[in-house]
Image (cartoon, helix red, strand yellow):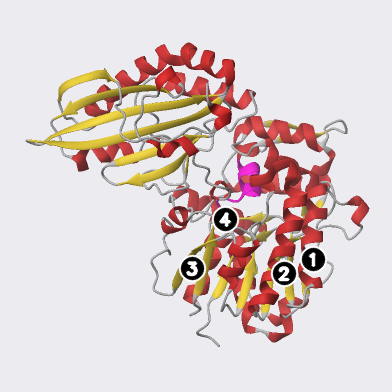
């Protein structure tokens, strides 16, 4: 039986990405499921001999059934909050029913679900917590026994809860806070969560049971703010609770001061309105481990950030959406349906030398030219409800498919040849940005920057032409600055170029002009 794999859904998410290495360390075979094989393939554990990657979607029953085939157990770590946004309740309901049915039809013997901890009175629960509770009920009503580990706030480098805490304390020396800062919570460190998840497989007493999991501290969110300030060696923060700040207003404020968007901040803040304290601790006797207190968990998370060793991040989750027209090649479409702006320069450098600055672009490195304009564009995007530049990047020099890069996401990376990004900012259309590195002989290499934009209606066309002069200026300056950053001379260019038609494909009907 131990030769059968363990299915992990949500494998590229914050918890799933940390659970898989722990399962491998414990000697288990793992089948990692995600919606993008390319995104899965960029994870550090992707090429482990005991890992099998499989494409699947919990909203697609047939793909879920294929993923679950011949597995002896399954972890359900999926929430549709990011992908479905306002429709996440119905999406989570459908996904849970699919998982229960797939587990039953494929012979999975048990499942483990990471749920949410909150007060037991359903009427007082937030919409998000009600959905988490409903998912648990659907899974446990099926024929396959499901263990529900109900977790409060998770503290760890890269978690959404930790990032909100970090940005609030580091950016705001004085805070006018909502009343929920006085609500009680029992935060748990991510490493303790992973240990519970892994070791549940070893203990029959956990099969089909519901357990509250939490750390050793019961404290208020205000206490957490003060502990963080102390551990980060910051001055004591002035915290003034007021009754008029609703969770919605709090979420918008968090969106402005942190990388976490309103769509994620809102359900998290709604969950903080009610107490989240363990009502029992049976699992501590079944699975004993050293539980980190909040101070230790925050200190460890800060150390990981300082060492640039953040294994997974809340930004990892979510669907990697590639525009349909992205496969059409470098085409200049008749009628100008797809707008493009291309610049290129030839340098006396190798492809590897040019790849070095390209793989470090964005985040703390910046964009090599007109960083003030990039920051201004990011600020405008935040005001419009977009993600802005604050997300940065997970690692200063490593990039993988699905990684966040400021207000872009990595669609493709082929070192040292190509980096393709898809825009996630608020724009009236869809946009791609691509860097291509092509050796041309005699230690000469051409670096191309190409922006492509599919406008949405008249507003998208106006948007493109308003920003077009800035694109030309920025691309020209970036190519020169990239050459300067590696100390290599430009042989020719930078110059404007028009991409030629390489392939033929049709645009979606609703985008035709």
| Residue bounds of the magenta highlight | 157-166
Helix, strand or loop for disc 1: helix
- Residue found 71% across the figure and 82% down from its top: 286
- Quarter of image, res 51: bottom left
Residue farthest left in this picture: 442
**In the figure, 466 relative to 306: above or below?**
above
User: Earlier along the polypeptide chain: callout 4 or callout 1?
Assistant: 4
Going from N to C along the chain, the mark reached first, 4 or 2, is 4
Which disc is residue 21 wearing? 3
Measured Cα–Cα span from mark 1 to mark 2: 7 Å
**Rendered image quadrant of residue 475:** top left
Q: Are marks 4 and 3 in contact (CB under 8 Å)?
A: no
How far apart are labels 4 and 2 at the CA level?
Answer: 20 Å
Quick check: is 53 in the magenta stretch?
no
Which residue does the numbered mark 4 point to in the structure image? Answer: 13
Where residue 143 appears, as percent x and y from the top left, is 77, 78
Instruction: State the residue position of label 2.
Output: 100
The reply to whether the C-beta atoms of the residues labelled 4 and 2 are less than 8 Å apart is: no
Q: Quadrant of the N terminus?
A: bottom right
Say which label, 2 or 3, has the lower sequence index. 3
Q: Are marks 1 and 2 in contact (CB under 8 Å)?
A: yes
Look at 53% across and 38% down and name the residue there: 391
Residue closest to the eye, 347 or 265: 347
């Amino acid at each position: 039986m131990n030769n059968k794999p363990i299915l992990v859904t949500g494998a590229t998410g914050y918890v799933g990405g940390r659970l898989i290495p722990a399962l491998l360390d414990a000697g288990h075979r793992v089948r990692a499921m995600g919606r993008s094989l390319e995104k899965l393939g960029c994870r550090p554990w992707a090429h482990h001999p005991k890992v099998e990657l499989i494409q699947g979607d919990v909203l697609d029953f047939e793909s879920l059934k294929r993923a679950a085939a011949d597995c002896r157990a399954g972890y359900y770590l999926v929430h549709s909050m990011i992908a479905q946004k306002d429709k996440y309740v119905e999406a989570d309901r459908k996904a849970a029913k699919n998982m229960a049915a797939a587990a039953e039809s494929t012979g999975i013997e048990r499942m483990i679900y990471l749920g949410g901890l909150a007060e037991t009175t359903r009427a007082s629960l937030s919409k998000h917590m009600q959905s988490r509770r409903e998912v648990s009920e659907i899974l446990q009503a099926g024929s396959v026994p499901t263990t529900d580990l109900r977790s409060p706030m998770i503290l760890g480098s890269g978690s959404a809860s930790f990032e909100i805490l970090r940005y609030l304390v580091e950016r705001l020396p004085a805070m006018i806070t909502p009343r929920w800062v006085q609500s009680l919570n029992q935060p748990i460190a991510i490493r303790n969560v992973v240990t519970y998840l892994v070791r549940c497989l070893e203990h029959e007493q956990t099969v089909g049971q519901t357990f509250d999991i939490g750390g050793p501290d019961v404290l208020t969110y205000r206490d957490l703010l003060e502990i963080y300030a102390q551990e980060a060696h910051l001055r004591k923060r002035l915290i003034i609770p007021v009754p008029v700040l609703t969770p919605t207003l709090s979420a918008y404020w968090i969106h402005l001061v942190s990388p976490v968007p309103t769509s994620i901040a809102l359900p998290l803040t709604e969950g903080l309105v009610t107490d989240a304290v363990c009502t029992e601790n049976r699992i501590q006797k079944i699975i004993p481990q050293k539980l980190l207190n909040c101070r230790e968990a925050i200190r460890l998370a800060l150390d990981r950030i300082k060492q640039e060793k953040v294994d997974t991040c809340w930004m990892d989750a979510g669907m990697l959406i590639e525009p349909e027209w992205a496969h059409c090649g470098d085409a200049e479409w008749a009628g100008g349906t797809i707008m493009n702006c291309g610049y290129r320069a030839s340098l006396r450098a190798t492809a590897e030398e040019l790849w070095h600055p390209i793989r470090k672009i964005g985040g703390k490195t910046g964009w090599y030219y007109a960083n003030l304009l990039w920051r201004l564009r990011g600020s405008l995007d935040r005001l419009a409800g977009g993600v802005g530049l604050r997300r940065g990047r997970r690692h200063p020099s490593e990039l993988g498919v699905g990684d966040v890069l400021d207000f872009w996401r990595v669609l493709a990376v082929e070192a040292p040849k190509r980096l393709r990004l898809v825009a996630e900012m608020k724009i009236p259309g869809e946009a791609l940005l691509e860097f291509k590195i092509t050796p041309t002989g005699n230690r000469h290499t051409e670096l191309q920057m190409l922006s492509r934009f599919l406008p949405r209606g008249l507003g998208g066309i106006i948007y493109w032409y308003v920003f077009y002069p800035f694109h030309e200026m920025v691309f020209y300056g970036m190519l020169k600055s990239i050459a300067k950053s590696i100390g290599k001379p430009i042989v020719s260019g930078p110059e404007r170029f028009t991409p030629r038609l390489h392939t033929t494909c049709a645009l979606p009907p609703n985008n035709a002009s």
